[in-house]
Image (cartoon, rainbow, N blue to C red):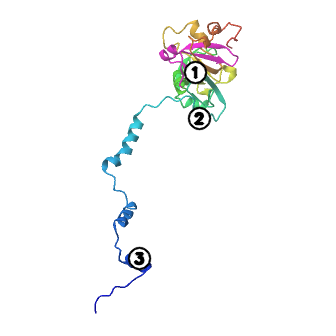
Amino acid sequence: MGWEPRIISMSEALRGRAQRRPLGRRGIQSHRLFAAPPAPGPARRLAPILILLVLALLPWPAQSGERLPQPKGPVLLAVSGDIDWTTDGREALFDRQMLESLGVVTLTAVSPLDETPVEFQGVLLRRLLAAVGAHGDAVEAIALNDYVAEIPFAEVERHDVVIALSRQGRAIPVREMGPLMILYPIGLEPGLNTEAIAARSVRQLARLVIRDSRSPLGGSSLASSADPSNDGTGAQP
């Protein structure tokens, strides 16, 4: 028998071709589209770590208006003015525990109520200024009766000026010129027993305002208000 040609339909031809068709080049390419990417090399794995290290070493800008812990007890002192850290965005409020957390020191001094030196416990004024991020060159110390005295920053750095919290180990009541008072180490450092230092030793301290005395907002009445006999701001008790 010889070979005889057979006429087939177009649909039969297509079915036969599809059955015999091997996985061609197109199939291989589509398979590669879903293949896992190559494993990263050591350099690519280290790149994110190096970026984080560089960011950590960059200097961060100083933050203004950072919050201090809120006082839990009665507020003894309010600090405002040119400061970085506050408790409410405007001023820094301190209760007794917050003040003591700055480090309690003991100072032997003579108060207006004592004829002989007694021990006072309190915190260094320069530590308090550092705790609120104070700027400027002077601090206004304001008493409960609005008496005001200006204390230069340079003086605070040079001498151990103390905000007294306790007298002989107990809290100082208002009737004894408390609850806070500013004391200088008059008996320990020569040259401090002056009328100017006495005027800055504010009793019944209630507020501190950080100022730049060279600016127009520094207050022109500070020199006169430091005089205890000044009737415009109130005399110290």
Q: Is residue 158 visible?
A: yes
- Asked if the residues shown at circle 2 and circle 1 are in contact, with their CB atoms under 8 angstroms apart, the answer is no
Q: CA distance from mark 3 to mark 2?
A: 82 Å
Q: CA distance from mark 3 to mark 1?
A: 88 Å
Check residue 152 for magenta coloring: yes
Judge depth for marks 3 and 1 and give the one in front.
3
Residue 92 rendering spot, x and y as whole percentages = 61, 28
Residue at the spot of label 3:
14
Q: Secondary structure at mark 2?
A: loop
**What amino acid is at disc 2?**
Pro
Residue at the spot of label 1:
82
Q: Residue at x 63, y 11 (%)?
A: 219
Q: Quadrant of residue 177?
A: top right
Q: Is residue 147 above or below residue 18?
A: above
- Which quarter of the figure is the C terminus placed in? top right
- Tell me the magenta residue range: 133-162
The answer to whether residue 9 is left or right of residue 89 is left
The answer to whether residue 51 is left or right of residue 116 is left
Residue at the spot of label 2:
69
Judge depth for marks 3 and 2 and give the one in front.
3
Q: Is residue 195 above or below residue 13?
A: above
Q: Secondary structure at mark 3?
A: helix
Q: Residues within 10 Å of mark 1 (few under 14, many from 20)?
A: some
Q: Quadrant of residue 86?
A: top right
Q: Secondary structure at mark 1?
A: loop
- Asked if the residues shown at circle 3 and circle 1 are in contact, with their CB atoms under 8 angstroms apart, the answer is no
Q: CA distance from mark 2 to mark 1?
A: 19 Å
Residue 205 rendering spot, x and y as whole percentages = 64, 20
Q: Residue at x 69, y 22 (%)?
A: 174
Q: Quadrant of residue 151?
A: top right
